[in-house]
Image (cartoon, helix red, strand yellow):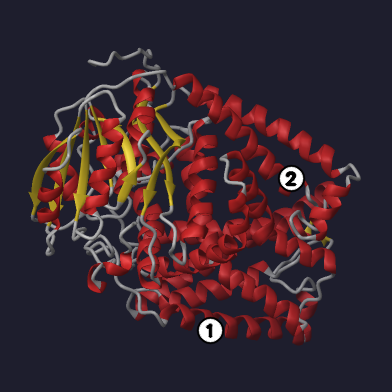
Amino acid sequence: MRTTEAKKPAYFQYASVDSTPKGLSHPVPLWYGPALIALFCVLSIASLYTITSIPLLRHTFPSGDLIIGPYQGTHSISVRIFLICYFVSYSVFCHANPLKKLTMGLDLCVSFAFLCITLDVTTIVLHRALDLTLPLTAVAILSGLLGFGIYAIKLLERGRMPPSVPMTIDTSRNGQTLMRGFVIGLFCVWLSIYLANRNYETIDLLRGYSLLGGIGPGIFLFLPAFFGMLYLGGLVDEAHFRFHKFAPDISVIIPAHNEMHIIEETLRGIETAAKNYDGSVTIVFVDNASSDDTIGVVEKVAKDLVYADVRILQEPHPGKANALNLGLSAVETEFFVRIDADTIVKKNAFRRGMTYFRSDEIGAVGGLPLSPGGGPFDRARLVEAVVKHGMYSVGLSAINGIVGVPGMFVIFRTELPRKLGGFAGGMNGEDTDMSLRIGELGYRLIVDPEVRFISEVPRTYAHMREQRMRWFRSTYHVASRCRAVVFGSEVSFRGKVILPYMLLNSGRRAMMVPLILFGLIEYFTGFKTLDVLELQAVIAVVFGAPLLISILALIANGYILQILFIPEYILFRLLRAYFTLESNLSINLDMKAEDLYADQNVAATTVKKRRKPRVTTASG
């Protein structure tokens, strides 16, 4: 029977120095989020009432949104009013003094207004010169993307972030990556158009239940098709790099802080995996300033282990990166596994994961985290993990787009973290930072869903909140530290497409709950009358495509019965979105915006000649 987290002392459940990195973030009171949403709703009602009730404004903005110009059709939501109301609400509750709050709010609103006016003027010119009229729906979508992007960039510019580091960027695979993405994308566009224009009963059924866009299902057919094709390509790549057997000696680094409640299971899981692995396994256990008897438990269990040796180190300075770097300095093998102290590896994890490293192209390998079961969030977390690591990560590997390998279990080529100066401290996302930089060196990153391990899932709201605020804040910390790959002149798919998309998506996710409330305000107060088709489109945007991709991911990974967990996952997505909003509120702000392009470390070293792959022997 598993040791439940309920047995863990309450004050050790989730607090650590990594929860709110000093100088970069701060704790957010529980009432901040609800207060921000309440203010947002008041501003939204007042704005919508003003623009629809004052004759001059109603005449100037007949669409019901702050849009000027010749457009055709209608749109489902007044996205520009929504974004302005959100920007003002965020600025009121962000962590800064009144002057910084005002500066942030003005920067957000003025920057957004400038881009919107530019867009409107462009459409006016196109209409007069070419008699071209854009659909209002397209303008609304573009406005939303601009708003999400501005929000993310301003958080990077004005938020206190980790300093940048010099980077080496390998551009040798750009041609291959672009060709793959283009061919797959072109095929999926054709497939989506073909199916959307056929009167198939299945398509009509999905539209009727808001699983495909009510106005135009093409984009919602495209997304599952595109990621499905990428997933198949990723599986082919993994099969190409996975060899029958490769079992050199390995080390396992375990950083631990107050983990006596779970560490015995962690060690015994490693023992089982070591028993099924042909090479020797050395556990490098690093106690990170624990105040409980974690070391005592480790010493006791170590005496019973047969297939794994244990070295115990002590790192007195709190912080996971400090513990990881001490463990890294003690590694004497060519490869090492980095796992969390609450990760229980499956018996085949080492045996299967290490087979990839026979190819010299592989830099890091991860797997699929499973939920232990029994907790209130476990079922939703399982679906989330299968979608992200069991499908998206596999697919992104086909186009060299993996940014982060799951930090709960990662196998590294030892020379690479050492070459990069070890794991970054004083920030969130040290594992993502490491795997991203290894990928940019030109090494392949692999996430194999058959490499499985059990990772603890928070059992309380407070613990889940702390974990997700850390995780979501890490997107900005990693983007800031590795800004050369985003804002530098050298082009890599990971840096110019995937990481910017993650920032854009972070902005969108933070606004998801306010966006839903805004739509409900418009609909039920009569400010905007949506017909059934438009309402289906709104629901499809929030729930439809993610639900379809979730079903596809679960089936592809053999979790058929777990499709029943999807309703919980959809609700969990809303909770996750709310935690993203709180995470953004936790970022400390500065008065002056930083010029992200002017940083001296943006000038990255470029590698344009691809390294010749070689096959390593078991002895290295």
Q: Quadrant of residue 17?
A: bottom left
Who's the residue at 48% across and 26% down the image?
238
* Residue type (three-letter) at the residue carrying disc 2: Leu
On the rendered image, what quadrant is the N terminus found in? bottom left
Which of 206 and 561 lies nearest the eye of the viewer? 561
On the rendered image, what quadrant is the C terminus found in? top left
Q: CA distance from mark 1 to mark 2?
A: 36 Å
As drawn, is 461 to the left or to the right of 213? left
Query: Is residue 111 in view from this perspective?
Result: no
Task: Give the structural element (helix, strand or loop) at label 1.
Answer: helix
Q: Quadrant of residue 67?
A: bottom right
Q: Earlier in the sequence, mark 1 or mark 2?
A: 1
Residue 71 vs 264, above or below: the answer is: below
Q: Position of residue 552 (x, y in %)?
A: 64, 44
As drawn, is 356 to the left or to the right of 513? left
Can you identify the residue that label 1 sits on? 38
Which of 205 and 555 lies nearest the eye of the viewer? 555
Other-residue count near label 1 (Cα within 10 Å), few / some / many at <14 / 14–19 / ≥20: some
Task: Count every numbered label the image shows and give the total.
Answer: 2
Other-residue count near label 2 (Cα within 10 Å), few / some / many at <14 / 14–19 / ≥20: many
Q: Position of residue 429 (x, y in %)?
A: 33, 51
Can you identify the residue that label 2 sits on? 221
Select label 1 or label 2 by which is in front: 2
Q: Which mark is residue 307?
A: none
Who's the residue at 30% across and 66% down the image?
25
Q: Are marks 1 and 2 in contact (CB under 8 Å)?
A: no
As drawn, is 211 to the left or to the right of 128? left
Q: Position of residue 505 (x, y in %)?
A: 53, 54
Which of 484 and 214 lies nearest the eye of the viewer? 214
